[in-house]
């Protein structure tokens, strides 16, 4: 026997109330001056004993009533199979409904999610009256639709019925943990968890932990015990093709120039798949199509797709393969912004006597890698000036400024430079022999916080060619160099660096920003990469083979600064003559130019964050999610984060294009959310693992005739006793009323 | 004494009805004046009774000279004398008589009863003596049949205020010793005392030859006992206060009252005493005329 509201037992102290009332009533009487006292005296003496006994009986009944009432409110309960006379005990349940992308797999009639919702609804229906239910949607996060178990089962039913399918990956452990946490604080004799999932192997990554947690919950005693029910709604779909990746090979998307996209198509089936038509759609219109002859089981094929963008601004680039039973991974979309032209200002710190000796010779040719005739038509336009002319130049006329071996410049120029970057300009710095490192470190790095790193001591000797450093050969994390993770894209490692500056990465700007961002991230998965904190933090783009930093970048205001460790010409290295120089420079320029497009393509569930101009601060942005009905639009306010107005949006549950519109000034931003390729693999939890789960939970596979009520009611035992006690209280109340009348009748 | 007091004490309706009925002596009474009632004394009177032989010392006035002339024997003429009586009105003036639930308190009712009876008796040329008592005689008006007596009676009644507890038995014994001439003793009281002692006192009074009439006054509330809730009874006499729930002991109380009255009634009947239970809620004229009518029927002439 245990009590679900043990504190209510203190209510038993209320038995003092009738005693107090009795004593108080003895002081409230009518006074009558009376002559015939002898008769009163005789009859009182005769009846005194009887009246006392009657009083005591009534007092005892009243005290007993209150004591029983306190007992009933304390909800005594007993776990036993034999006490079902008063109906089933109330259940507090948590419905964990898997809404990950793989639940979208259809059997041709209905999806796994449709089945799961029906099962969940049946589970709610099967709860005894007076029960409470919470609803958690499980993907890689636990989304609490009904956080605290509600007694309004219609609400729970509605929440289940209207639960949306997401494109997120699966990880059931956080949801199960959350469900147990929800139940922990509840007072109920029976606690149940219903896990309704497709049993996709990817969702059971933490199977060991799940097993252990459920086992612990099952082995608890009394009201801490939780029984788990697992319903698997899968129907062993093995065949699946999916677009597992899509990237823009060139870093920039200039207008009317050929753009090359790399799409990866994976075959998750156990058989070979032939003749897969892969089509590229620009803003919904077919632009290119390639057929992959065959993909072996478990294999992945990359296909190039080409197109040109005809208009400036944002475009949706979608790659689609023929539909199958899992539509969630049959398409993948990117948001790309087309640019008309890029103006680059190169400041040459060492022009030399002839063009070839110029510090910017290789730089200029790499930025405009076409013949002189075609350069007019080319989208990158370069201008070169000497450091002395910097003071008279309007930086805002350019998209990007490159400082090549510039010794130093005036404080006014430094201020102009800072403002240029903060307004959205890109700054690329190459050091050299003439560079005044003290000026750079003090003025630009420390005072203005423009540089991602400070210059250390120069290392190596440029005069020899035996001892050199090269770029790292693998593990390219930064988007600029991520391209070279694919061996087909060539190599960066061939370049030799004879002399370099040591770069010392600066710390993140302020702790506050990090904390703030950290808070926003709490409760979300670690896979969220595009955090607000990392937006502004200086970070390494590329390292040398010895681990020292070769390239570093940081965001400043709306702009971005990239710092190299070595020269732009061949004085200290031979990067300028290596084939990788052009793509590296273009991708870097792309990052600088598309600073606004930071994180325009995020993984499903990740947070989208965009730095915006100051005039948009505190404005409301309307976010329209893909596939959302016209009426359902999310409103987000643009807030100041770390000194910059930022729009952030984290409800990226669906894959596809999200359109953000701000009314004043009229602004449209697009970003794309890509599904998690891990969801495409529909392999299921092995049978022996399911059997093992059967030890800690009641496991049931879905079939059209499955009767949830029958299945769960067998397992339910235990009863609460408040109802019989309440009936006893009512009976006592009736007895008390009768006796009070009977005793006080005229005698 | 003003007219108001007179009007309060003398109920005109009661008196007008009572006058026609009259208060007659049920037994032979010893009066001192020729009147309506038969006297046990034979001697000077109006109606001849018998002759007896002269004995030396007899008053020669009553010698029947005609018989002496004819027969030469000495006979004395004896007459049956009709005489008046003395009514002793004993009114209980103890504190318990102060009680009254709505209408008249018992004492006021008793005073009215005493006043009406006095008037009636005096009006018949009989004599009245008034004794208001508690544990001893508090007010006493010696017997008188003068017309002024009624004023004295009324004034005494009106002026009386109760102060002490009752001791009826002692008063009755005292009265029995004092009364030399047989008359009527009218006791007006609630008799809240030991009933055995009261009956002994009555018996003593009867033994002396007096007729006794007991008017037992009780308030309707005392008879019905219709109280509810928790009540503390504050005693008018010696018994300390009692806290109780009256509705729960009502039956027991009423039985106790009934037992008390029955004891008194039976005791009175044994002694040939009229026991008149009076509910002070009833109009006085009903009570008085009812009793007088009953008395007239049962009187022996």
Image (tube, coloured by chain):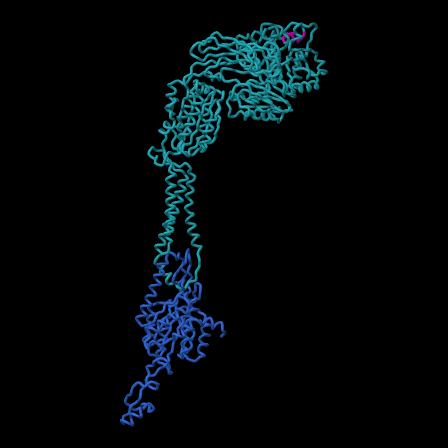
Chain colours: A cyan, B blue
Residue A540 placed where, x, y %?
Answer: 57, 16
Specify whether residue A691 is painted magenta.
Answer: no
Taking the spot 48% from the left edge, 29% from the top edge, the residue there is A146
Q: Quadrant of the N terminus of chain A?
A: top left
Could you say which is closer to the camera, residue A134 or residue A507? A134
Question: Can see residue A413?
Answer: yes
Could you say which is closer to the camera, residue A362 or residue A73? A73
Could you say which is closer to the camera, residue A47 or residue A239? A239
Residue B81 placed where, x, y %?
Answer: 34, 83
Residue A227 is left or right of residue A379, and the answer is left
Residue B17 is left or right of residue A620, and the answer is left
Q: Is residue A5 above or below residue B103?
A: above
Specify whether residue A361 is painted magenta.
Answer: yes
Main secondary-structure element of the magenta-colored stretch: helix
Could you say which is closer to the camera, residue B4 or residue A493? B4
Q: Quadrant of residue B253?
A: bottom left
Q: Quadrant of the C terminus of chain A?
A: bottom left
Q: Is residue A258 above or below residue B222?
A: above
Q: Which residues are magenta?
A: A358-366
Residue A20 placed where, x, y %?
Answer: 43, 50
Residue A232 placed where, x, y %?
Answer: 41, 22
Q: Quadrant of residue A124?
A: top left
Question: Can see residue A44?
Answer: no
């Amino acid at each position: 026997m245990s009590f679900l509201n043990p504190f209510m037992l203190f209510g038993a102290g209320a038995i003092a109330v009738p005693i107090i009332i009795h004593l108080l009533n003895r002081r409230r009487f009518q006074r009558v001056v009376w002559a015939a006292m002898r008769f009163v005296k005789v009859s009182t003496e005769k009846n005194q004993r009887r009246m006392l006994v009657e009083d005591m009986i009534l007092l005892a009944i009243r005290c007993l009533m209150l004591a029983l009432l306190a007992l009933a409110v304390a909800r005594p309960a007993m776990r036993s199979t034999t006490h079902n006379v008063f109906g089933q005990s109330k259940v507090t349940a948590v419905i964990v409904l898997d809404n990950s992308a793989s639940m979208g797999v259809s059997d041709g009639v209905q999806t796994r999610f449709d089945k799961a919702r029906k099962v969940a609804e049946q589970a709610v229906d099967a709860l005894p009256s007076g029960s409470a239910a919470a609803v958690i949607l499980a993907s890689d996060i636990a989304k609490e639709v009904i956080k605290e178990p509600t007694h309004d089962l219609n609400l729970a039913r509605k929440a289940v019925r209207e639960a949306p399918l997401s494109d997120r990956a699966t990880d059931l452990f956080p949801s199960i943990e959350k469900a147990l946490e929800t139940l922990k604080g509840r007072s109920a004799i029976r606690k149940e968890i219903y896990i309704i999932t497709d049993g996709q192997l990817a969702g059971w990554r933490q199977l060991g932990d799940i097993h252990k947690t459920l086992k612990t919950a099952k082995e608890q005693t009394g009201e801490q015990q939780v029984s788990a029910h697992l319903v698997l709604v899968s129907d062993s779909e093995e065949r699946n093709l999916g677009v597992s990746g899509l990237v823009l090979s060139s870093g920039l998307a200039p207008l009317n120039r050929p753009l090359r996209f790399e799409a990866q198509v994976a075959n998750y089936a156990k058989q070979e798949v032939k003749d897969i038509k892969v089509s590229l759609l620009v803003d919904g219109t077919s632009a290119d199509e390639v057929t992959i002859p065959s993909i072996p089981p478990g294999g992945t094929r990359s296909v190039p797709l080409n197109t040109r963008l005809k208009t400036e601004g944002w475009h949706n680039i979608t790659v689609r393969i023929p539909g199958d039973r899992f539509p969630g991974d049959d398409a993948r979309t990117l948001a790309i912004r087309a640019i008309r032209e890029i103006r680059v200002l190169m400041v040459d710190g060492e022009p030399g006597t002839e063009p070839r000796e110029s510090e910017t010779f290789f730089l200029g040719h790499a930025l405009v890698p076409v013949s002189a005739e075609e350069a007019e038509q080319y989208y990158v336009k370069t201008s070169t000036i000497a450091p002395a002319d910097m003071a008279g130049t309007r930086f805002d006329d350019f998209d990007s400024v490159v400082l090549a071996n510039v010794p130093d410049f005036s404080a006014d120029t430094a201020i102009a430079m800072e403002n240029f970057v903060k307004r959205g300009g890109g700054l690329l710095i190459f050091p050299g022999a003439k560079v005044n490192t003290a000026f750079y470190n003090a003025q630009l790095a420390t005072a203005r916080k423009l540089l991602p790193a400070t210059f250390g001591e120069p290392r190596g000797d440029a005069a020899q060619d035996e001892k050199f450093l090269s770029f790292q050969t693998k593990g390219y994390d930064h988007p600029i160099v991520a391209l070279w993770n694919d061996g087909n894209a060539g190599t960066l490692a061939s370049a030799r660096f004879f002399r370099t500056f040591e770069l010392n990465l600066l710390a993140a700007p302020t702790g506050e920003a990090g904390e703030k961002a950290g808070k926003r991230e709490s409760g979300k998965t670690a896979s969220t990469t595009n955090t607000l904190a990392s937006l502004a933090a200086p970070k390494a783009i590329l390292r040398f083979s010895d681990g020292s930093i070769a390239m570093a970048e940081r965001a400043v205001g709306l702009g971005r600064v990239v710092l190299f460790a070595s020269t732009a010409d061949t004085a200290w290295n031979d990067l300028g003559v290596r084939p990788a120089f052009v793509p590296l420079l273009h991708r870097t320029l792309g990052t600088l130019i598309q600073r606004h497009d930071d994180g325009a393509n995020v993984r499903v569930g990740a947070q989208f964050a965009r730095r915006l101009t100051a005039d948009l601060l505190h404005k409301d942005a309307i976010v329209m999610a893909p596939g959302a009905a016209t009426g359902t639009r999310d409103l987000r306010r643009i807030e100041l984060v770390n000194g910059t107005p930022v729009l952030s949006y984290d409800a990226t549950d669906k894959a596809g294009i999200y359109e953000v519109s701000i009314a004043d000034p009229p602004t449209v931003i697009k970003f794309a959310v890509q599904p998690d390729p891990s969801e495409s693999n529909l392999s299921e939890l092995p049978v022996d693992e399911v059997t093992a789960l059967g030890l800690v939970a009641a496991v049931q596979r879905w079939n059209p005739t499955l009767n949830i009520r029958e299945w769960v009611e067998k397992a339910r035992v235990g009863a609460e006793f408040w109802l019989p006690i309440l009936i006893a209280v009512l009976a006592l109340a009736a007895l008390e009323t009768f006796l009070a009348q009977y005793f006080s009748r005229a005698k | 004494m003003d007219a108001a007091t007179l009007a309060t004490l003398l109920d005109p309706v009661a008196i007008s009805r009572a006058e026609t009925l009259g208060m007659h002596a049920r037994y032979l009474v010893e009066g001192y004046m020729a009147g309506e009632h038969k006297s046990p004394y034979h001697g000077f009177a109006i109606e001849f009774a018998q002759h007896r032989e002269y004995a030396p010392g007899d008053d020669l006035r009553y010698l029947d000279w005609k018989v002496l002339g004819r027969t030469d024997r000495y006979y004395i003429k004896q007459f049956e004398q009709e005489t008046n009586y003395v009514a002793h009105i004993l009114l209980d003036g103890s504190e318990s008589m102060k009680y009254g639930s709505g209408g008249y308190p018992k004492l006021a009712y008793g005073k009215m009863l005493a006043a009406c009876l006095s008037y009636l008796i005096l009006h018949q040329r009989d004599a009245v003596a008034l004794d208001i008592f508690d544990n001893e005689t508090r007010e006493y008006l010696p017997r008188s049949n003068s017309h002024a007596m009624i004023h004295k009676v009324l004034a005494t009644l009106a002026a009386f205020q109760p102060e002490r507890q009752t001791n009826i038995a002692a008063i009755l014994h005292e009265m029995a010793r004092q009364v030399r001439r047989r008359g009527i003793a009218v006791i007006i009281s609630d008799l809240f005392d030991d009933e055995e002692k009261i009956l002994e006192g009555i018996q003593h009074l009867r033994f002396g030859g007096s007729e006794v009439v007991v008017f037992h006054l009780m308030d309707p509330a005392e008879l019905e006992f219709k109280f509810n809730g928790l009540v503390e009874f504050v005693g008018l006499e010696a018994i300390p206060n009692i806290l109780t729930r009256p509705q729960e002991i009502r039956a027991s109380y009423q039985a106790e009252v009934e037992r008390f009255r029955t004891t008194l009634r039976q005791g009175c009947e044994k002694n040939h005493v009229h026991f008149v239970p009076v509910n002070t809620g009833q109009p006085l004229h009903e009570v008085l005329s009812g009793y007088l009518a009953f008395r007239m029927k049962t009187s022996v002439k």
